[in-house]
Image: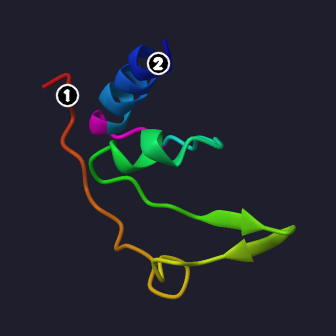
């Protein structure tokens, strides 16, 4: 069931929608192409990938209706 929902969310993301998922299942996140991980540990924000120090550059998306 979780994999079906993740598949739908991945499809929305490909269309340009930002998707935020809170989960305890790290396997689910690691199986998601392009996922960025931000963790909470003991109530503190942990930045294992450096994504917060080096945020991604904003991208332009084409209009899918065209």
State whether the magenta stretch is mostly helix, strand or loop: loop
Q: Would you place residue 43 above or below residue 11 in this image?
A: below
Residue drawn at (29%, 33%) of the image: 15
Q: Which of labels 1 and 2 is toward the front? A: 2
Q: Nearer the viewer, residue 44 or 17?
A: 44
The reply to whether callout 1 and callout 2 are in contact (CB within 8 Å) is: no
Q: Nearer the viewer, residue 7 or 2?
A: 2
Residue marked by disc 1:
64
Within the magenta stretch, is there residue 20? no
* Secondary element at image label 1: loop
Residue marked by disc 2:
5
Q: Nearer the viewer, residue 58 or 3?
A: 3
* Secondary element at image label 2: helix
Q: Nearer the viewer, residue 21 or 54?
A: 21
Residue that extends furthest to the left in the rendered view of this protein: 66
Q: CA distance from mark 1 to mark 2?
A: 22 Å
Q: x%, y% of residue 40?
A: 73, 64
Q: x%, y% of residue 44?
A: 81, 74
- Which tag, 1 or 2, sits closer to the chain's start? 2
Q: How many marks?
A: 2
Q: Would you place residue 36 above or below residue 28 in this image?
A: below
């Amino acid at each position: 069931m979780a994999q079906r929902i993740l598949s739908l969310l991945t499809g929305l993301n490909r269309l340009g929608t930002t998707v935020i998922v809170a989960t305890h299942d790290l396997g689910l996140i690691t199986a998601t192409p392009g996922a960025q991980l931000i963790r909470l540990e003991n109530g503190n924000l942990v930045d294992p990938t450096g994504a917060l120090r080096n945020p991604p550059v904003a991208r332009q998306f084409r209009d899918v209706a065209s």
